[in-house]
Image (cartoon, grey):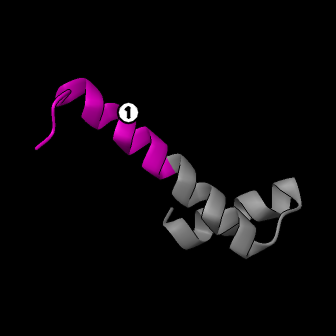
Amino acid sequence: MNKAELVHEVAGKVGLTKKETNNLVDAITSTITDSLASQFCPNPL
């Protein structure tokens, strides 16, 4: 499943627009990435 497919599926399930859902997916992905990065590299350059 790619990002566009994920956005489409989630938008249909939660009743948001695709643009709103895309922003949500971006925020979740960014949050997870930042959290993982801080665990493995607590003092980034």
Q: Residues within 10 Å of mark 1 (few under 14, many from 20)?
A: few
In the picture, measured across the screen, residue 37 lies left or right of residue 7, that is left
User: Which residue lies under the disc numbered 1?
Assistant: 35
In this view, 12 is above or below 33 = below
Q: Residue at x 26, y 36 (%)?
A: 37
- Residue 37 belongs to magenta span: yes
Q: Residue furthest right?
A: 15
- Residue 44 belongs to magenta span: yes
Q: Residue at x 47, y 43 (%)?
A: 31
In the image, 32 versus 2, the foreground residue is 32
In the picture, measured across the screen, residue 39 lies left or right of residue 2, that is left
Query: Within the image, what quadrant is residue 17 found in?
Result: bottom right
Q: Position of residue 44 (x, y in %)?
A: 15, 39
Q: Position of residue 10 (x, y in %)?
A: 73, 57
Quarter of the image for the C terminus: give it: top left
Q: Position of residue 33 (x, y in %)?
A: 36, 43
Q: Residue at x 20, y 27 (%)?
A: 42
In this view, 29 is above or below 4 = above
Which residues lie in the magenta part?
29-45
Count the marks.
1
Q: Position of residue 1 (x, y in %)?
A: 51, 62
- Amino acid type for the residue under numbered disc 1: Ser
In the picture, measured across the screen, residue 17 lies left or right of residue 35, that is right
Query: Within the image, what quadrant is residue 36 found in?
Result: top left
In what element is the residue under mark 1?
A: helix
Q: Report the magenta stretch's main SS.
A: helix
